[in-house]
Image (cartoon, helix red, strand yellow):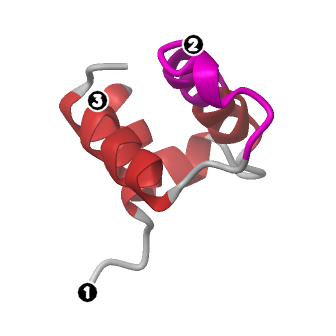
């Protein structure tokens, strides 16, 4: 079982690194936080009808799928 969440694994993969390698580069996760926030901004632009509302579970599932495929 991985000790890393799937979104962090996608972040590392995006940068051509393993999660362990990314940990040594981004020790405080500042870059990861900025990266994942930008991905959410990009995703949310596709769903303006839900602006200001809590994201339903299906959005998290779809977001993770798109993130893992590099689609956002």
Whether residue 17 appears in this view of the structure is no
Q: Residue at x 36, y 52 (%)?
A: 9
Occupied quadrant, residue 51: top right
Asked if residue 68 lies left or right of residue 6, the reply is left
* Numbered label attached to residue 45: 2
Part of the protein shown in magenta: 38-53
Occupied quadrant, residue 16: top left
Horizontal and vertical percent for residue 72? 38, 19
Closer to the chain start, of discs 1 and 3, is 1
> Which residue extends farthest left?
69
Answer above or below: position of 30 versus 71.
Answer: below
- For the N terminus, the image quarter is bottom left
Horizontal and vertical percent for residue 13? 29, 37
Q: Residue at x 44, y 46 (%)?
A: 59
Occupied quadrant, residue 26: top right
Give the distance between the C-alpha atoms of the residues marked 1 and 2, in whole angstroms. 33 Å
Please report contact status of discs 1 and 2: CB closer than 8 Å, yes or no. no
* Numbered label attached to residue 1: 1
Q: Residue at x 57, y 13 (%)?
A: 45
Using the image as rendered, state which of residue 29 and residue 40 is in the foreground.
40
Residue tagged 3: 16
Horizontal and vertical percent for residue 14? 34, 28
> Which residue extends farthest bottom?
1
Mark in the foreground, 1 or 3: 1
Q: So how many labels did they put on this image?
A: 3
Assign a secondary structure to mark 1.
loop
Mark in the foreground, 3 or 2: 2
Assign a secondary structure to mark 2.
loop
């Amino acid at each position: 079982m991985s000790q890393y969440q799937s979104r962090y694994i996608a972040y590392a993969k995006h940068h051509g690194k393993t999660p362990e390698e990314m940990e040594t580069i981004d020790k405080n996760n500042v870059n990861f936080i900025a990266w994942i926030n930008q991905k959410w901004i990009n995703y949310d632009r596709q769903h303006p009808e839900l602006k200001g509302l809590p994201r339903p579970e299906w959005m998290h599932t779809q977001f993770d799928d798109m993130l893992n495929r590099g689609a956002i």
